[in-house]
Image: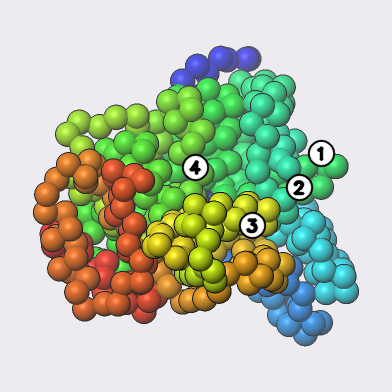
Protein backbone atom coordinates (compact mmCIF):
# COMPACT_ATOMS: atom_id res chain seq x y z
CA UNK A 1 0.00 0.00 0.00
CA UNK A 2 1.31 3.46 -0.86
CA UNK A 3 1.68 5.83 2.06
CA UNK A 4 2.57 9.48 1.87
CA UNK A 5 5.38 10.61 4.18
CA UNK A 6 5.19 14.40 4.53
CA UNK A 7 7.50 14.26 7.56
CA UNK A 8 10.10 12.03 6.04
CA UNK A 9 13.70 12.03 7.25
CA UNK A 10 16.92 11.42 5.30
CA UNK A 11 19.46 9.46 7.38
CA UNK A 12 23.12 9.45 6.37
CA UNK A 13 25.63 7.01 7.84
CA UNK A 14 29.36 7.72 7.55
CA UNK A 15 32.19 5.25 7.04
CA UNK A 16 32.57 4.12 10.65
CA UNK A 17 28.80 3.60 10.91
CA UNK A 18 28.97 1.00 8.09
CA UNK A 19 32.52 -0.22 8.74
CA UNK A 20 31.57 -3.86 9.46
CA UNK A 21 28.54 -6.06 10.06
CA UNK A 22 28.02 -4.99 13.68
CA UNK A 23 28.18 -1.31 12.78
CA UNK A 24 25.76 -1.87 9.88
CA UNK A 25 23.42 -3.73 12.19
CA UNK A 26 23.51 -0.87 14.72
CA UNK A 27 22.83 1.63 11.94
CA UNK A 28 19.97 -0.56 10.68
CA UNK A 29 18.43 -0.40 14.18
CA UNK A 30 18.54 3.40 14.00
CA UNK A 31 16.73 3.34 10.66
CA UNK A 32 14.11 0.90 11.90
CA UNK A 33 13.54 2.81 15.14
CA UNK A 34 12.15 5.83 13.29
CA UNK A 35 9.22 5.33 10.91
CA UNK A 36 9.97 8.65 9.28
CA UNK A 37 13.31 7.52 7.88
CA UNK A 38 12.52 6.67 4.26
CA UNK A 39 15.80 7.50 2.55
CA UNK A 40 19.20 6.25 3.71
CA UNK A 41 22.41 7.68 2.28
CA UNK A 42 25.60 5.72 2.86
CA UNK A 43 29.33 6.28 2.76
CA UNK A 44 31.75 3.52 1.84
CA UNK A 45 32.85 1.32 4.76
CA UNK A 46 35.68 2.98 6.74
CA UNK A 47 39.02 2.80 4.94
CA UNK A 48 37.53 1.70 1.60
CA UNK A 49 37.61 5.08 -0.16
CA UNK A 50 41.25 5.59 0.89
CA UNK A 51 42.16 2.23 -0.66
CA UNK A 52 40.24 3.04 -3.84
CA UNK A 53 41.88 6.47 -4.09
CA UNK A 54 45.30 4.79 -3.84
CA UNK A 55 44.31 2.37 -6.60
CA UNK A 56 43.02 5.25 -8.72
CA UNK A 57 46.45 6.91 -8.52
CA UNK A 58 47.86 3.94 -10.48
CA UNK A 59 49.67 1.14 -8.65
CA UNK A 60 51.78 -1.62 -10.09
CA UNK A 61 50.49 -5.17 -10.09
CA UNK A 62 51.64 -6.43 -6.67
CA UNK A 63 50.56 -3.31 -4.75
CA UNK A 64 47.30 -3.37 -6.63
CA UNK A 65 46.62 -6.95 -5.60
CA UNK A 66 47.44 -6.16 -1.94
CA UNK A 67 44.93 -3.31 -1.87
CA UNK A 68 42.25 -5.38 -3.61
CA UNK A 69 42.79 -8.22 -1.13
CA UNK A 70 42.25 -5.77 1.72
CA UNK A 71 39.08 -4.48 0.06
CA UNK A 72 37.83 -8.03 -0.48
CA UNK A 73 38.45 -8.89 3.17
CA UNK A 74 36.39 -5.89 4.37
CA UNK A 75 33.45 -6.89 2.15
CA UNK A 76 33.64 -10.61 2.88
CA UNK A 77 33.77 -10.04 6.64
CA UNK A 78 30.35 -8.45 6.28
CA UNK A 79 29.00 -11.01 3.79
CA UNK A 80 30.06 -13.90 6.04
CA UNK A 81 27.74 -12.62 8.78
CA UNK A 82 24.64 -12.53 6.55
CA UNK A 83 22.06 -15.31 6.88
CA UNK A 84 21.86 -15.98 3.15
CA UNK A 85 24.95 -14.49 1.58
CA UNK A 86 24.98 -16.19 -1.82
CA UNK A 87 23.20 -13.66 -4.09
CA UNK A 88 24.65 -10.51 -2.57
CA UNK A 89 28.07 -12.21 -2.39
CA UNK A 90 27.99 -12.64 -6.18
CA UNK A 91 27.06 -8.99 -6.72
CA UNK A 92 29.90 -7.82 -4.49
CA UNK A 93 32.37 -10.15 -6.24
CA UNK A 94 31.26 -8.65 -9.54
CA UNK A 95 32.04 -5.16 -8.19
CA UNK A 96 35.43 -6.38 -6.89
CA UNK A 97 36.14 -7.67 -10.41
CA UNK A 98 35.23 -4.25 -11.82
CA UNK A 99 37.65 -2.70 -9.33
CA UNK A 100 40.42 -5.04 -10.51
CA UNK A 101 39.74 -4.23 -14.15
CA UNK A 102 39.48 -0.46 -13.58
CA UNK A 103 42.64 -0.32 -11.47
CA UNK A 104 44.58 -2.08 -14.27
CA UNK A 105 43.14 0.38 -16.77
CA UNK A 106 44.00 3.40 -14.63
CA UNK A 107 47.59 2.13 -14.23
CA UNK A 108 47.92 1.89 -18.02
CA UNK A 109 46.19 5.17 -18.88
CA UNK A 110 45.19 7.35 -15.90
CA UNK A 111 42.18 9.60 -16.30
CA UNK A 112 40.08 11.57 -13.84
CA UNK A 113 36.86 10.03 -15.18
CA UNK A 114 38.21 6.52 -14.69
CA UNK A 115 39.33 7.40 -11.14
CA UNK A 116 35.84 8.54 -10.20
CA UNK A 117 34.32 5.39 -11.64
CA UNK A 118 36.74 3.31 -9.61
CA UNK A 119 36.33 5.26 -6.36
CA UNK A 120 32.51 5.11 -6.61
CA UNK A 121 32.64 1.35 -5.96
CA UNK A 122 33.06 1.88 -2.20
CA UNK A 123 29.58 3.37 -1.84
CA UNK A 124 28.10 0.90 -4.35
CA UNK A 125 29.29 -2.02 -2.21
CA UNK A 126 28.33 -0.62 1.20
CA UNK A 127 24.83 0.31 0.00
CA UNK A 128 24.18 -3.17 -1.46
CA UNK A 129 25.29 -4.79 1.78
CA UNK A 130 23.31 -2.43 3.98
CA UNK A 131 20.12 -3.00 1.96
CA UNK A 132 20.63 -6.73 2.52
CA UNK A 133 21.16 -6.25 6.28
CA UNK A 134 17.85 -4.38 6.42
CA UNK A 135 16.03 -7.02 4.37
CA UNK A 136 17.30 -9.75 6.68
CA UNK A 137 15.63 -7.78 9.45
CA UNK A 138 12.33 -8.01 7.59
CA UNK A 139 12.36 -4.40 6.41
CA UNK A 140 11.06 -3.47 3.01
CA UNK A 141 14.28 -1.97 1.68
CA UNK A 142 15.12 -1.03 -1.89
CA UNK A 143 18.59 -0.29 -3.28
CA UNK A 144 18.76 2.75 -5.51
CA UNK A 145 21.55 4.05 -7.76
CA UNK A 146 22.16 7.67 -6.69
CA UNK A 147 23.72 8.45 -10.07
CA UNK A 148 20.22 8.59 -11.55
CA UNK A 149 19.45 11.62 -9.40
CA UNK A 150 22.69 13.35 -8.38
CA UNK A 151 23.36 15.02 -11.74
CA UNK A 152 26.59 17.03 -11.78
CA UNK A 153 29.00 18.83 -14.06
CA UNK A 154 32.08 16.96 -15.29
CA UNK A 155 34.57 18.28 -12.74
CA UNK A 156 35.74 14.78 -11.83
CA UNK A 157 36.97 14.49 -8.26
CA UNK A 158 34.95 17.46 -6.97
CA UNK A 159 31.91 17.69 -9.23
CA UNK A 160 29.25 20.31 -8.62
CA UNK A 161 25.59 19.27 -8.55
CA UNK A 162 23.01 20.77 -10.85
CA UNK A 163 20.38 21.62 -8.24
CA UNK A 164 17.37 21.87 -10.57
CA UNK A 165 18.26 18.58 -12.27
CA UNK A 166 18.68 16.89 -8.88
CA UNK A 167 15.22 18.14 -7.87
CA UNK A 168 13.64 16.99 -11.11
CA UNK A 169 15.22 13.53 -11.05
CA UNK A 170 14.54 13.03 -7.33
CA UNK A 171 10.89 13.87 -7.81
CA UNK A 172 10.64 11.47 -10.76
CA UNK A 173 12.69 8.52 -9.46
CA UNK A 174 12.94 8.77 -5.69
CA UNK A 175 9.61 10.18 -4.52
CA UNK A 176 7.55 7.19 -5.73
CA UNK A 177 10.04 4.77 -4.18
CA UNK A 178 10.20 6.32 -0.71
CA UNK A 179 6.44 5.94 -0.55
CA UNK A 180 6.80 2.18 -1.07
CA UNK A 181 10.02 1.21 0.72
CA UNK A 182 13.00 2.41 2.72
CA UNK A 183 15.35 3.48 -0.06
CA UNK A 184 19.07 2.81 0.39
CA UNK A 185 21.39 4.85 -1.77
CA UNK A 186 24.98 6.03 -2.06
CA UNK A 187 26.43 9.30 -0.88
CA UNK A 188 29.33 11.00 -2.67
CA UNK A 189 28.64 9.77 -6.22
CA UNK A 190 26.78 11.26 -9.16
CA UNK A 191 26.81 11.34 -12.92
CA UNK A 192 27.45 13.97 -15.58
CA UNK A 193 25.55 14.70 -18.80
CA UNK A 194 27.54 12.07 -20.67
CA UNK A 195 26.47 9.47 -18.09
CA UNK A 196 29.96 9.13 -16.59
CA UNK A 197 30.28 8.61 -12.84
CA UNK A 198 31.45 11.66 -10.86
CA UNK A 199 32.26 12.25 -7.17
CA UNK A 200 31.53 15.26 -4.96
CA UNK A 201 34.93 15.49 -3.21
CA UNK A 202 36.13 13.76 -0.05
CA UNK A 203 33.49 13.57 2.65
CA UNK A 204 30.78 14.30 0.06
CA UNK A 205 28.14 11.90 1.40
CA UNK A 206 26.92 14.51 3.88
CA UNK A 207 26.35 16.80 0.91
CA UNK A 208 24.37 14.11 -0.95
CA UNK A 209 22.10 13.68 2.07
CA UNK A 210 21.26 17.37 2.27
CA UNK A 211 20.89 17.70 -1.53
CA UNK A 212 18.33 14.88 -1.50
CA UNK A 213 16.67 16.35 1.59
CA UNK A 214 16.33 19.64 -0.26
CA UNK A 215 15.08 18.01 -3.46
CA UNK A 216 12.36 16.03 -1.68
CA UNK A 217 11.52 18.63 1.02
CA UNK A 218 12.57 16.38 3.89
CA UNK A 219 11.50 17.35 7.41
CA UNK A 220 15.03 16.64 8.73
CA UNK A 221 18.41 15.31 7.68
CA UNK A 222 20.19 13.08 10.21
CA UNK A 223 23.96 12.72 9.95
CA UNK A 224 25.11 9.65 11.90
CA UNK A 225 28.83 9.58 12.53
CA UNK A 226 31.39 8.59 15.18
CA UNK A 227 30.90 11.61 17.47
CA UNK A 228 27.76 12.53 19.39
CA UNK A 229 27.31 15.87 17.65
CA UNK A 230 29.20 19.01 16.78
CA UNK A 231 31.69 20.03 19.47
CA UNK A 232 33.38 23.28 20.40
CA UNK A 233 36.41 21.93 18.58
CA UNK A 234 37.55 18.59 17.17
CA UNK A 235 37.37 16.24 20.20
CA UNK A 236 40.33 14.34 18.73
CA UNK A 237 42.47 17.45 19.28
CA UNK A 238 40.98 18.62 22.59
CA UNK A 239 39.47 15.97 24.85
CA UNK A 240 37.68 18.71 26.85
CA UNK A 241 35.71 19.86 23.79
CA UNK A 242 32.02 20.26 24.65
CA UNK A 243 29.06 19.20 22.60
CA UNK A 244 26.94 22.05 21.21
CA UNK A 245 23.26 21.07 21.55
CA UNK A 246 21.84 23.73 19.24
CA UNK A 247 23.68 25.70 16.62
CA UNK A 248 22.60 27.96 13.77
CA UNK A 249 23.09 27.14 10.10
CA UNK A 250 25.49 30.01 9.68
CA UNK A 251 27.66 29.06 12.68
CA UNK A 252 27.82 25.38 11.69
CA UNK A 253 28.37 26.28 8.06
CA UNK A 254 31.33 28.47 9.05
CA UNK A 255 32.69 25.61 11.15
CA UNK A 256 32.44 23.20 8.21
CA UNK A 257 33.94 25.70 5.77
CA UNK A 258 36.85 26.36 8.12
CA UNK A 259 37.69 22.68 8.49
CA UNK A 260 35.41 20.96 11.06
CA UNK A 261 35.39 17.63 9.26
CA UNK A 262 32.21 16.44 10.97
CA UNK A 263 30.30 18.06 8.08
CA UNK A 264 31.36 18.39 4.44
CA UNK A 265 31.72 22.17 3.80
CA UNK A 266 28.72 22.34 1.44
CA UNK A 267 26.33 20.26 3.56
CA UNK A 268 24.39 23.09 5.09
CA UNK A 269 23.81 25.07 1.91
CA UNK A 270 20.84 22.98 0.68
CA UNK A 271 19.50 22.74 4.24
CA UNK A 272 19.61 26.52 4.61
CA UNK A 273 17.88 27.06 1.27
CA UNK A 274 14.89 24.98 2.36
CA UNK A 275 15.18 25.55 6.12
CA UNK A 276 15.62 21.84 6.89
CA UNK A 277 17.04 21.09 10.35
CA UNK A 278 20.12 18.85 10.40
CA UNK A 279 20.79 16.53 13.32
CA UNK A 280 24.29 15.17 14.00
CA UNK A 281 24.72 12.18 16.32
CA UNK A 282 26.74 9.05 17.01
CA UNK A 283 25.49 5.78 15.52
CA UNK A 284 27.42 3.94 18.25
CA UNK A 285 25.74 5.84 21.07
CA UNK A 286 22.32 7.19 20.20
CA UNK A 287 21.55 7.72 23.89
CA UNK A 288 24.25 10.40 24.01
CA UNK A 289 22.04 12.72 21.93
CA UNK A 290 23.54 15.13 19.45
CA UNK A 291 23.47 18.55 17.86
CA UNK A 292 20.54 20.13 16.08
CA UNK A 293 21.49 22.65 13.41
CA UNK A 294 18.67 25.03 12.49
CA UNK A 295 18.04 28.53 11.24
CA UNK A 296 18.31 30.31 14.57
CA UNK A 297 19.32 29.55 18.12
CA UNK A 298 18.53 31.32 21.35
CA UNK A 299 21.26 33.49 22.86
CA UNK A 300 24.06 32.85 20.38
CA UNK A 301 27.29 33.03 22.39
CA UNK A 302 30.18 35.36 21.64
CA UNK A 303 32.53 32.40 21.13
CA UNK A 304 31.03 29.31 19.48
CA UNK A 305 33.84 27.03 18.31
CA UNK A 306 37.37 26.68 16.98
CA UNK A 307 38.04 24.97 13.66
CA UNK A 308 41.30 24.00 12.04
CA UNK A 309 42.07 23.39 8.40
CA UNK A 310 45.32 21.72 7.35
CA UNK A 311 47.38 21.86 4.14
CA UNK A 312 47.13 25.59 3.63
CA UNK A 313 49.41 27.58 1.34
CA UNK A 314 50.41 31.23 1.69
CA UNK A 315 51.04 33.03 -1.57
CA UNK A 316 52.73 36.40 -1.21
CA UNK A 317 52.83 38.68 -4.24
CA UNK A 318 54.95 41.84 -4.38
CA UNK A 319 54.62 44.58 -6.94
CA UNK A 320 57.82 45.10 -8.99
CA UNK A 321 57.27 48.69 -10.05
CA UNK A 322 55.72 51.92 -8.92
CA UNK A 323 52.24 51.25 -10.28
CA UNK A 324 49.39 52.39 -8.01
CA UNK A 325 48.02 49.79 -5.60
CA UNK A 326 44.62 49.63 -7.34
CA UNK A 327 46.27 48.71 -10.66
CA UNK A 328 48.45 46.05 -9.03
CA UNK A 329 45.44 44.53 -7.22
CA UNK A 330 43.28 44.61 -10.36
CA UNK A 331 45.92 42.87 -12.48
CA UNK A 332 46.63 40.29 -9.80
CA UNK A 333 42.97 39.36 -9.35
CA UNK A 334 42.47 39.23 -13.12
CA UNK A 335 45.23 36.59 -13.32
CA UNK A 336 43.75 34.66 -10.38
CA UNK A 337 40.31 34.75 -12.01
CA UNK A 338 41.68 33.59 -15.35
CA UNK A 339 43.23 30.58 -13.64
CA UNK A 340 40.10 29.99 -11.50
CA UNK A 341 42.00 30.20 -8.22
CA UNK A 342 39.60 29.90 -5.35
CA UNK A 343 41.09 32.62 -3.14
CA UNK A 344 40.23 31.99 0.46
CA UNK A 345 41.64 34.79 2.60
CA UNK A 346 43.39 37.98 1.58
CA UNK A 347 45.43 40.69 3.27
CA UNK A 348 47.11 43.60 1.53
CA UNK A 349 49.85 46.14 2.16
CA UNK A 350 50.82 49.10 0.00
CA UNK A 351 53.03 46.98 -2.31
CA UNK A 352 51.84 43.48 -1.78
CA UNK A 353 49.05 40.97 -1.45
CA UNK A 354 49.03 37.82 0.72
CA UNK A 355 46.59 35.07 -0.15
CA UNK A 356 45.76 31.95 1.82
CA UNK A 357 44.80 29.07 -0.45
CA UNK A 358 42.97 25.98 0.67
CA UNK A 359 43.96 22.52 -0.59
CA UNK A 360 41.17 21.06 -2.70
CA UNK A 361 39.02 18.33 -1.16
CA UNK A 362 39.07 16.61 -4.53
CA UNK A 363 38.82 12.84 -4.58
CA UNK A 364 41.91 12.76 -6.80
CA UNK A 365 43.82 14.09 -3.79
CA UNK A 366 45.97 16.40 -5.92
CA UNK A 367 46.42 19.93 -4.77
CA UNK A 368 46.54 21.50 -8.18
CA UNK A 369 45.70 25.09 -7.19
CA UNK A 370 49.22 26.34 -7.92
CA UNK A 371 49.61 25.24 -11.53
CA UNK A 372 52.72 26.03 -13.57
CA UNK A 373 50.58 28.20 -15.86
CA UNK A 374 49.36 30.27 -12.92
CA UNK A 375 52.86 30.70 -11.46
CA UNK A 376 54.26 31.66 -14.86
CA UNK A 377 51.56 34.30 -15.31
CA UNK A 378 52.05 35.68 -11.79
CA UNK A 379 55.85 35.73 -12.08
CA UNK A 380 55.64 37.85 -15.23
CA UNK A 381 53.71 40.42 -13.22
CA UNK A 382 55.17 40.41 -9.70
CA UNK A 383 57.56 38.70 -7.27
CA UNK A 384 56.03 35.49 -5.96
CA UNK A 385 56.76 33.77 -2.64
CA UNK A 386 55.11 30.49 -1.67
CA UNK A 387 54.95 29.06 1.83
CA UNK A 388 53.44 25.63 2.43
CA UNK A 389 52.94 23.46 5.53
CA UNK A 390 50.53 25.87 7.17
CA UNK A 391 47.24 25.47 9.02
CA UNK A 392 44.35 27.86 9.41
CA UNK A 393 42.96 28.14 12.93
CA UNK A 394 39.59 29.92 13.03
CA UNK A 395 37.61 31.20 15.97
CA UNK A 396 33.91 31.15 15.10
CA UNK A 397 31.55 33.29 17.10
CA UNK A 398 28.88 35.95 16.91
CA UNK A 399 29.34 39.69 16.49
CA UNK A 400 33.01 39.53 17.39
CA UNK A 401 33.42 43.08 16.06
CA UNK A 402 31.15 44.54 18.73
CA UNK A 403 33.03 43.08 21.65
CA UNK A 404 36.16 44.55 23.13
CA UNK A 405 38.60 42.00 24.46
CA UNK A 406 38.38 39.52 21.57
CA UNK A 407 41.89 40.36 20.40
CA UNK A 408 43.31 40.17 23.91
CA UNK A 409 41.61 36.78 24.50
CA UNK A 410 43.02 35.30 21.33
CA UNK A 411 46.37 36.99 20.78
CA UNK A 412 47.62 36.19 24.27
CA UNK A 413 47.17 32.47 23.58
CA UNK A 414 49.02 32.67 20.27
CA UNK A 415 51.96 34.50 21.77
CA UNK A 416 54.25 31.46 21.49
CA UNK A 417 53.70 31.03 17.75
CA UNK A 418 54.77 32.75 14.55
CA UNK A 419 51.46 33.83 13.09
CA UNK A 420 51.79 34.18 9.32
CA UNK A 421 48.49 35.92 8.57
CA UNK A 422 45.45 37.25 10.48
CA UNK A 423 42.01 37.86 8.93
CA UNK A 424 39.02 39.59 10.44
CA UNK A 425 36.63 42.19 9.10
CA UNK A 426 35.00 40.73 6.01
CA UNK A 427 32.97 38.60 8.41
CA UNK A 428 31.93 39.79 11.86
CA UNK A 429 31.68 36.23 13.07
CA UNK A 430 35.09 34.74 12.60
CA UNK A 431 38.73 35.49 13.23
CA UNK A 432 41.35 33.49 11.32
CA UNK A 433 45.02 32.83 11.99
CA UNK A 434 47.43 31.15 9.59
CA UNK A 435 50.18 29.31 11.49
CA UNK A 436 52.79 26.64 10.86
CA UNK A 437 50.96 23.33 10.78
CA UNK A 438 52.98 21.89 13.67
CA UNK A 439 51.79 24.72 15.93
CA UNK A 440 48.09 24.29 15.12
CA UNK A 441 47.13 21.70 17.74
CA UNK A 442 48.82 23.67 20.54
CA UNK A 443 47.16 26.87 19.37
CA UNK A 444 43.72 25.22 19.25
CA UNK A 445 44.20 23.68 22.71
CA UNK A 446 45.36 26.99 24.22
CA UNK A 447 42.51 28.99 22.67
CA UNK A 448 39.99 26.34 23.72
CA UNK A 449 41.25 26.38 27.30
CA UNK A 450 40.83 30.15 27.57
CA UNK A 451 37.59 30.57 25.65
CA UNK A 452 35.60 27.41 26.42
CA UNK A 453 36.86 25.54 29.50
P1 LIG B 1 31.97 10.20 8.82
O1 LIG B 1 32.84 9.15 8.23
O2 LIG B 1 30.90 9.68 9.70
O3 LIG B 1 31.49 11.19 7.80
P2 LIG B 1 34.08 12.06 9.59
O4 LIG B 1 35.36 11.45 10.00
O5 LIG B 1 33.99 12.65 8.24
O6 LIG B 1 32.91 11.00 9.84
O7 LIG B 1 33.66 13.21 10.63
C1 LIG B 1 33.64 12.93 12.01
C2 LIG B 1 34.93 13.46 12.64
O8 LIG B 1 34.95 14.88 12.55
C3 LIG B 1 35.06 13.20 14.12
O9 LIG B 1 35.61 11.93 14.39
C4 LIG B 1 35.95 14.33 14.60
O10 LIG B 1 37.28 13.94 14.79
C5 LIG B 1 35.93 15.33 13.44
N1 LIG B 1 35.62 16.70 13.87
C6 LIG B 1 36.31 17.80 13.51
N2 LIG B 1 35.83 18.88 14.09
C7 LIG B 1 34.78 18.49 14.84
C8 LIG B 1 33.86 19.18 15.69
N3 LIG B 1 33.91 20.50 15.87
N4 LIG B 1 32.90 18.44 16.30
C9 LIG B 1 32.82 17.10 16.14
N5 LIG B 1 33.68 16.40 15.36
C10 LIG B 1 34.63 17.08 14.71
N1 LIG C 1 33.52 7.74 1.06
C1 LIG C 1 33.80 9.12 0.72
C2 LIG C 1 35.06 9.58 1.45
O1 LIG C 1 35.65 8.82 2.21
C3 LIG C 1 32.65 10.03 1.00
C4 LIG C 1 32.21 10.12 2.44
O2 LIG C 1 32.59 9.28 3.26
O3 LIG C 1 31.47 11.05 2.76
O4 LIG C 1 35.49 10.68 1.22
MG1 LIG D 1 32.49 12.75 6.79
Residue assigned mark 4 = 267
- Placement of 417 over or under 260, stated as above or below: below
Alpha-carbon distance for marks 2 and 3? 24 Å
Residue assigned mark 1 = 193
Q: Of marks 4 and 3, which one's residue comes earlier in the chain?
A: 4
Quadrant of the snapshot with the N terminus:
top right
Alpha-carbon distance for marks 4 and 3? 30 Å
Answer few, some or many: residues within 10 Å of disc 1's Cα (few below 14, many 20 plus, some between 14 and 19). few
Alpha-carbon distance for marks 1 and 2? 8 Å
Q: Which mark is residue 154?
A: 2
Image depth: mark 1 or mark 3 in front: 3
Residues at badges 2 and 3 in contact (C-beta under 8 Å)?
no
* Residue drawn at (25%, 46%) of the image: 397
x then y, percent, for residue 292: 33, 37
Residues at badges 1 and 2 in contact (C-beta under 8 Å)?
yes
Q: Of marks 1 and 2, which one's residue comes earlier in the chain?
A: 2
Whether label 4 lies within 8 Å of ligand 3 gets the answer: no
Residue assigned mark 3 = 335
Image depth: mark 4 or mark 3 in front: 3
Res 347 seen here: yes
Q: Of marks 1 and 4, which one's residue comes earlier in the chain?
A: 1
Q: Of marks 2 and 3, which one's residue comes earlier in the chain?
A: 2
Alpha-carbon distance for marks 4 and 2? 20 Å
The quadrant in which residue 38 appears is top right
Q: Of marks 1 and 3, which one's residue comes earlier in the chain?
A: 1
Front position in the image: 38 or 207? 207
Amino acid sequence: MTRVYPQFVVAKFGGTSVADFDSMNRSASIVLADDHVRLVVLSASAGVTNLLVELSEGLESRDRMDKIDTLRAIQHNIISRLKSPSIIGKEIDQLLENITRLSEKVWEAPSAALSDELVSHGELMSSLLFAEVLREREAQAEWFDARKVIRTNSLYGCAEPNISQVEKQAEAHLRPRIEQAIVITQGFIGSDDAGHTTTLGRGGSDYTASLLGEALHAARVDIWTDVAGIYTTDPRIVAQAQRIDHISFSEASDMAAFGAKVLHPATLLPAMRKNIPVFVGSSKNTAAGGTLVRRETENPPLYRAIAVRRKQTLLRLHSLNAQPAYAFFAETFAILAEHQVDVDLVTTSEKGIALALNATSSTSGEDNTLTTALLTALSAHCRVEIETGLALVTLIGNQLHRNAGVCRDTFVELDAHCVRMICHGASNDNLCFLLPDDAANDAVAALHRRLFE
